[in-house]
Amino acid sequence: MNIDQLTIDHLDDLVILFEAYRVWYRQPADSIKARAFLSERINRNESIIFGAFDELGQMVGFTQLYPLFSSTRMGRIWSLNDLFVQPQSRGQGISLQLLDRAKKLAIDTTAIGILLETEKSNVIGNRLYPRAGFHLEEDTHYYFWMSEDKS
């Protein structure tokens, strides 16, 4: 398995996985918007995306991270916003490899750490993240404000 940082040249394969990821989170498929969204993130250097490639060179998973900053800790934090592996490729440790690559990014950029969130109902993720060294923050509350209907 190879884990590589993705570029605009990977967009076609990435859009397919990104759409599957969004549908898994009960969002409507829209490959045109997905392509525009991902293209914009890549072209503006607004996120770092790593892809997992099998022995045939097929992209089977990805993770996308966004830079954040903490004023209280006075440093960079990476937000791991997306992590997805094709269902037929699960159980091979690909998610752990993608998480390890994200951790290397954090180390290489002298970040404080990586922040992520997942649904309470995500049984697989809620088992995976502690195994990968992430700990559940139980002493904070997570709030979200949504402008208009941006669902």
Image (cartoon, rainbow, N blue to C red):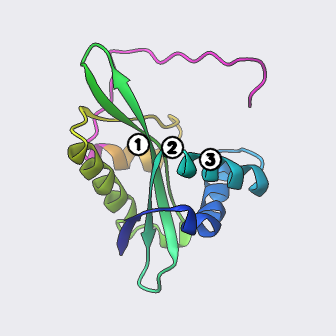
| Within-10-Å neighbours for mark 3: few <14, some 14–19, many 20+ | some
Residue denoted by label 2: 122
Q: Is residue 50 magenta?
A: no
The residue at the point 75 percent across, 49 percent down is: 33
Q: Residue 150 placed where, x, y %?
A: 74, 28
| 62 shown above or below 131 | below
Of residues 35 and 114, the one nearer the viewer is: 35
Q: Position of residue 44 (x, y in %)?
A: 54, 45
Q: Which mark lies nearer to you, 1 or 3? A: 3
- For discs 2 and 3, the disc positioned in front in the rendered view: 3
Determine the image quadrant of residue 17: bottom right
| Of 86 and 37, the residue lying toward us | 37
Q: Which residues are magenta?
A: 130-151
Q: Residue furthest front?
A: 44
Estimate the x, y position of residue 101 in percent, counting from the top left.
31, 56
Above or below: residue 51 compared with residue 42:
below
Please say if the residues under marks 2 and 1 sit with CB atoms less than 8 Å apart: yes
Q: Which mark is residue 26?
A: none
Q: In the rendered view, tell whether residue 90 sits above or below residue 109.
A: below
User: Is there CB contact under 8 Å for labels 1 and 3?
Assistant: no
Label 2's element?
Answer: loop
- Dot 3 amino acid type: Glu
Label 2 – label 3 distance at C-alpha? 28 Å
Residue at (47, 62) in percent of width and height: 6
Other residues around mark 2 within 10 Å, as few (<14) / some (14–19) / many (≥20): few
Q: Residue at x 28, y 39 (%)?
A: 134
Count neighbours of disc 1 (C-alpha within 10 A) and say few if under 14, some if 14 to 19, many if 20 or more: some
Disc assigned to residue 126: 1
- Residue located beneath label 3 in the image: 40
